[in-house]
Amino acid sequence: MASQAEQMAAGLTLSNFAQASDLKKRLWFTVGALIVFRVLSYVPLPGIDPVAMQDVFKNLHGGILDLFNNFSGGALLRMSVIVVGVMPYITASIVVQLSTSLSPTLNAIKKEGESGRKKLNQYTRYLTVMLCIIYGYGTSQSLLLSHTSAGMPVVVVQSHLLFTISCVTSVVGGTMFLMWLGEQITSRGIGNGVSLIIMAGIVSQLPAGIVSLLEAARTNANGFNGLTVIFIALLTIAMIAFICFMERAQRRVLIQYPKRQTQRGMQQEKSHLPLKINTANVIPPIFASSLLAMPLTLLQFAGKRATGESAFGDFVLSVTSWLQPGAPLHAVLYATLIIFFCFFYTAVIFNPEETADNLKRHGGFIPGIRPGKNTADYLDYVLTRITVIGAAYLTFICLVPEVLVANISPALSRLGGTGLLIVVNVTIDTVTQIQGHLLAHQYGDLLKKAKLKGGRGR
């Protein structure tokens, strides 16, 4: 029999949404903040030739710049003040999270509660600033490198020192503003602010990808026709449904507690320990994409500089072609890194021994398993098995676009598996929060009615 909360959730209608004034304010604030993010992506850095910058991206397709451009909503292509988006903050958050599991000192700070969380957030901000300085300096030097690279257009029209200072300053300021904007969305809007900013950047690139697909079908380029477009659309819908199913899939481990005396006599409490099939979420594809894109970018720059040097230049260009998205070697390395990071990240964020100790401390146990080490071994066994399924799922979702890019059209590179995973996950979380606000509003109305009835009965 469904619970009262489930019955209320099933009865949510548009009229309930129209009456939730606080939720509407939060939604409008979120929309306004995302509009500010999109406007900033069109504010360019000083000293950049935008036409030459587009030529650079044509030569560096598939590299780390292409990855950052997709996540920042085209801000890198236009060399805007939010050129790297929130990627430094995401990287810093992951590093701090991993460090709390590996460092006893940071792990002790994490256990301090709210004060510990504030300290870790402060460390994350400091690390974000450091990464922004590194990204800004690296971006400026990469663009200045075009002045000495054969076949590369001149992008910077300012003095080298002035451009380096302005680039580093803009990257730090732009990323810190986006981080603050994401925190404002989280507290005053709806959903996770940083995740919504990333999703907005990815979604903004989808129209250009769809237009390129339709144009390829119109011109019948390389056998690309309307049936292919229909196939891709149906495949995308099927992948979205599959992602929704897998992201909500759990392995529930039964937990029992000793019998306790209640008003109805001796009763035994039962609960479940939910273990997500995809415990690592979207971290493995992001790490794998970044690790593969970085050497590809360096090789592309080296290949441009080595033009005319037949031995070294030909070798570099050959390796670059092997690492391009859609190439067999790229797909094999991509799948291997995703599987590795699935197991590595899951082992870092979930500690079976700590979970077993917490269950033992509160009197909980798994039926048929002794508390303590046996429980930890059992949880580790279950987690390893479901991680195999999660790693296979992530690998499949991320490799399907690779196969399409290699066999159908390079234009499909805009619709990558990592971006699709992020968009679907953020959408699910946001819809869940909206539903939670609507349920809270309904409970508030019921409490008001109950108070009114109680007052009349006196």
Image (cartoon, rainbow, N blue to C red):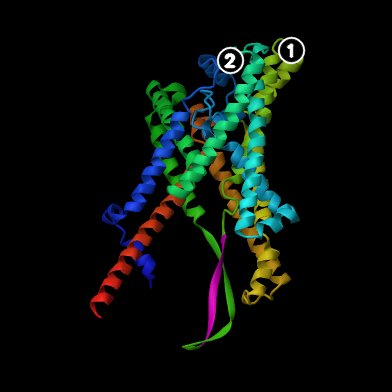
**Classed neighbour count for the residue bearing mark 2: other residues with Cα under 10 Å, few (<14), some (14–19), many (≥20):** many
Q: Is residue 122 above or below residue 164?
A: below
**Classed neighbour count for the residue bearing mark 1: other residues with Cα under 10 Å, few (<14), some (14–19), many (≥20):** few
Amino acid type at image mark 1: Ser
Screen quadrant of the N terminus: bottom left
Amino acid type at image mark 2: Val
The part of the chain drawn in magenta is 266-275
Instruction: Find out whether residue 273 is within the magenta segment.
Output: yes
* In-front residue for pair 406/385: 385
| Whole-percent x, y for residue 318 in the image | 68, 22
| Whole-percent x, y for residue 189 in the image | 43, 47
Q: Which residue is mark 1?
A: 310
Is residue 326 visible to us here?
A: no
Report how many numbered discs are placed on residues in the image. 2
- Kindly state the secondary structure of the residue where label 2 is placed: loop
Screen quadrant of the C terminus: bottom left
Q: Which residue is mark 2?
A: 155
Q: Is residue 93 above or below residue 225?
A: below
